[in-house]
Amino acid sequence: MSVPPIKFTFSSYEKFVVALLAFLQFTIVLDFMILGPLGPFLLRDLQLSTSQFSRVVSVYAWSAGASGLLAAGFADRFDRKRLLIFFYSGFLLGTLLCGVAWSYGVLLVARIITGLFGGVIGSITMAIVADLFPLQVRGRVMGTVQTAFAASQVLGIPIGVALSNLWGWHAPFLMIVAVSSLVGIVIVFCLRPIDAHLALQSKASSFQHLLSTVRQTRYLRTFAATMLLATGGFMLMPFGSTFTVYNLGVDFEHLPLVFVITGGVTFVAAPLLGRLSDSFGKYRTFCLGSLVGMVLVIVYCNLGRTPLALVITLNTALFLAITTRMVSATALISGVPDGADCGAFMAVNASMQQLAGGVAALFAGMIVSQSSDGQLAHYDLLGYVVALAMTIVMALMYPIHRTVMLKAARPATA
């Protein structure tokens, strides 16, 4: 079963929107992912324990999950551009507070504020993509938007680590504020209103709209898959750089090189992987990425001292597998909601993802411990848990795939 093919030519404005969303996601992803590479600096400068550091990471997810649920009821009641500007402004405020934080407590509060606003932006982006682009080309769109993750690896994280080496761990957050402010200006003056969904809304209250969304079986099934989909990244990410430095033996000077090469390859590959998911099939592409990722994550998490070239090779291959999963999964999931529920569905879906990530990050902090020489113990156990989660998600995604394919085939059948 496949989606009926269509011919679709992107207009210059649609290309601009895709590029803007990708750059917007770059700032959000960078703000979230920068904590991993800054882990060694925070553990040293703020004298944090591994459990405290996992709280700093997970509290973003908890607050983002809560705000997603709160926003879901009215997510379809406003112009998506207005919502985007509101939440992006709050994200800028939270990131600025991270940049001036002077203690563990202040940093924790700053991450809560950042999560409250930044966690909703991803769902707004997904809703915009679902509003403006047909399912048959969403793999290409998501592939381009997902280059935000790679760009953060190539540009943001290495620059952030370099700035931390020069001026301390506050500097990367201030850099994100400066770049994000420019993105905000472009959104305000160049993005057109996105309000066609308003004509589909009923007179039900925001709370009733939320309830009707979370009661649908096909939506609940998708939320469950999304929660497990988030497990891998949130469990491995917080201690990824620490594991690379202290267990694999990559020094701080070469750590940016790992991110640059990994991100560079992924930046080129992500749009191609999006095209692959549109042509080969989104579910089949997802399964392919999952199977390769399962093998690689187990191998990687069991490594000891490893030559730099092999670390880069395995890290790049693993990130490509993860990107394959994320591009195909997000494109497939975007076809689940009806037009009237798109914003609410995306908000709840993002909320479930963030909440599951918060649990995963805390769980990782309880499993992993750091010895006096900096090495992490039990990181291999995280790899086995992530591989198991990947297996379960493949099973959960199959009925979602069938539902989306049937839904997409109805107009053609009619």
Image (cartoon, rainbow, N blue to C red):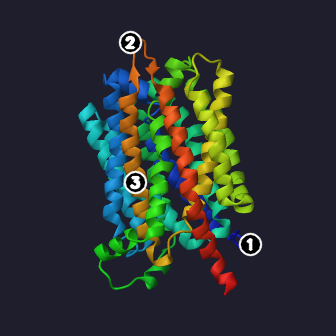
What mark, if any, has residue 48 been given in the picture? none
Label 3 sits on a secondary structure element that is helix
Q: Tell me the CA gap for discs 2 and 3.
A: 35 Å
Residue at the spot x=49%, y=67% of the render? 127
Number of numbered discs visible in the structure rendering = 3
x and y percentages locating residue 35 in the rendered image? 43, 35
- From the viewer's side, name the closer residue of 94 and 225: 225
Q: Which amino acid is tagged 3?
A: Gly
Residues under labels 3 and 1: Cα distance?
Answer: 33 Å
Residue holding disc 3: 119
Residue 5, label in figure: 1
Residue 114 visible in the picture: no
Q: Pick whichever of labels 3 and 1 is earlier in the sequence.
A: 1
For this view, does 11 lie left or right of residue 330? Answer: right
- The residue sitting at 69% across, 69% down in the picture is 10
Viewer-closest of 381 and 260: 381
* Identity of the residue drawn at 51% across and 72% down: 192
Residue 42 drawn above or below residue 65: above
Query: Looking at the rendering, which quadrant does residue 308 occupy?
Result: top right
Which percent across, then down, holds residue 26? 53, 49
Answer with mark 2 or mark 1, whichever residue precedes in sequence.
Answer: 1
**Residue type of the residue flagged with mark 1:** Pro
Residue 296 x/y as whole percent: 63, 34
Q: Amino acid at mark 2?
A: Ser
Task: Name the residue carrying label 2.
Answer: 372
> Seen in the image, is 267 located left or right of residue 374?
right
Q: Nearer the viewer, mark 3 or mark 1?
A: 1
Q: Label 1: how many residues lie within 10 Å, few (<14), some (14-19) or many (20+)?
A: few
Separation of marks 2 and 1 at Cα, in angstroms:
58 Å
Kind of element beneath mark 1: loop
